[in-house]
Amino acid sequence: MTGKLPTRYWSIATLALTLFAQNASAAVEIRGFGSATAVKVDSPFNWPNYGTHGQAVDVSNSSKVGLNFNSSLGDDFSATVQLIFPAYESSVNQILDWGFVSWKPNQNFNARAGRVLAPVWLYSQSRNVGYNYVWAKLPEEVYSLNPLNSINGLSLLSTNIVGPGILQAELIAGEGEDIKSDDFVSQNRTTKTQISSALGLALSYNVNDWFLVRGFAATANVKAEIDTALTLPAGSLTGISVATTLGVPTVLNLTTAKLFEIGTKIDRDGYLFSSEYVRILTGGTSEPRASGFYAMAGKKLGHWTPHFTYSWQGDLQGSIWYHPQYPAVTTLQTGGHSWSPGLNYQMGENIVLKSEYSNSYQDYANASQNLKFNVYRLSADFIF
Amino acid sequence: MKRTFISLVLLLTVGAQRSAAGEILVVSGPNFTVKKELTKEQVRLAFLGKPASVDGVQLHALDRKEHSVKTNFYKQVVGRTSVEMKAYWSEQVFTSLGYPPPVAADLNDLKKQLSDSKDEISYVDGSENTSGLNVLMRVSY
């Protein structure tokens, strides 16, 4: 981050501008959303990505409340901040979902500076707002591949009527940082991903509000640091009579990453369909390639919405795809898939109750160590 | 034959009553720059916060508080239910793409807000007093 404006300054600047607007007697509009989610995975391993640790029912990993503050800064300018309060412990940096100053001289153009959401996959910008999508959790096989949740930089959004639909083009440029903590059977890992010189373009075409097709391409410099705290049991390996924790830092300079996505969404006469294919290419050896795909179909039947999703992840190459029990090179993951039926109930205008079951498979280089497990989710997603 | 004729008359009467059940008027203030009727698509886009311009004038929407005319307007003109509109604005707001239009508290407030505006449009029920307003489009339902 040397020579660049640290993340916290972007956040403070945006918050300050919002407060300034408040002091200048401009109205601050406050809206919110949240999810109360219970997850159970019937597997002896920890699956933090799936929202749970161990086999107990977990309510803290996916539950959250968000607040959105918007304030006018005079003609054509506004300031917006969105904060996320997850049920689990989180840093200030994680609480600021995004925040920026926006200049919108007309309905055709919007320039934003600050921490902006990266329009990477179809639902990336909604990832914290369960009310905005049909699933209790976005398809893991695709959405776990997104390294760019938000960036500190600039977004230029152009919206124009073209033929029978609306064409939107969004250019983003900037840098970002993502910190993930997870724990395997005997390890605690913190993965810090630093993204610099990110440049991306999203194009979407929406016809009559029921048909959307979009694509995204981006390039970025990515550097990952993995700090692993390996706890070794007393005696056996260390020869010491008490449990020993070893810190094992690993720096993976992945150089240039390239992301591609194509997706479509249909919502017509109660029929729902959504599908995406994503692909990541990087220059290093840790995650040189990964692909993901899902297709979801559903039908609104009054207050009820049954839906079904098939999701796939494959073409995994590199050294970061550990097995939860045997994190060694011989057992790296090569792919996986899941199928997930779900049933939602729209309770009034502001709340959706969701139930979802996923049957997940993970394939490893050593096929005898392939895994199969079930994930059960109950969720109440709401807005206010 | 007589029975068929009576059935037909009844059907037509019911149909006519349905078609005349209500009317929504899309309106502007006296200073509105555009001097021609708007299309349903232009109005729909304006109320979804999308680019909608007529003769180079960008249309801006002025919404109304919860009221039966609001439900009818969104159903007949925008083509969405109130639940669908909630979902639409949730997606727009929480993904930083846009915010819903300002809201007039009542008919008097609507007239007041439109009176000075050159580019704002709103809607009233056909039975409401439209004095001081220009009617830009009529939708019967």
Image (cartoon, coloured by chain):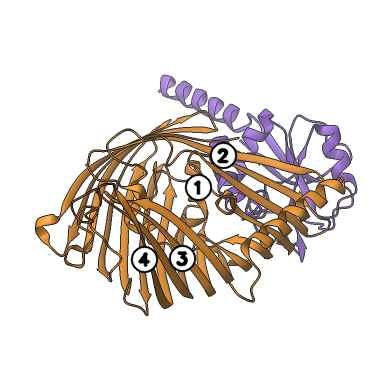
Chain colours: A orange, B purple
Labels 3, 2: front one = 3
- Mark 3 falls within which chain? A
Dot 4 or dot 1, earlier in sequence: 1
Tags 4 and 1 on a common chain: yes
Dot 2 or dot 4, earlier in sequence: 2
Of residues A29 and B65, the one nearer the viewer is A29
The local secondary structure at tag 3 comes to strand
Of residues A243 and B63, the one nearer the viewer is A243
Dot 3 or dot 2, earlier in sequence: 2
Of residues A186 and A33, the one nearer the viewer is A186
- Mark 1 falls within which chain? A
- Residue holding disc 2: A33
Quarter assignment of residue B55: bottom right
Dot 1 or dot 2, earlier in sequence: 2
- Residue holding disc 4: A278
Dot 3 or dot 4, earlier in sequence: 3
- The span from disc 4 to disc 1 (Cα, nearest Å) is 20 Å
Q: Position of residue B9 (x, y in %)?
A: 51, 25
Q: Amino acid at mark 3?
A: Thr
- The span from disc 3 to disc 1 (Cα, nearest Å) is 19 Å
- How crowded pointer 4 is (Cα within 10 Å; few <14, some 14-19, many 20+) is rated as many
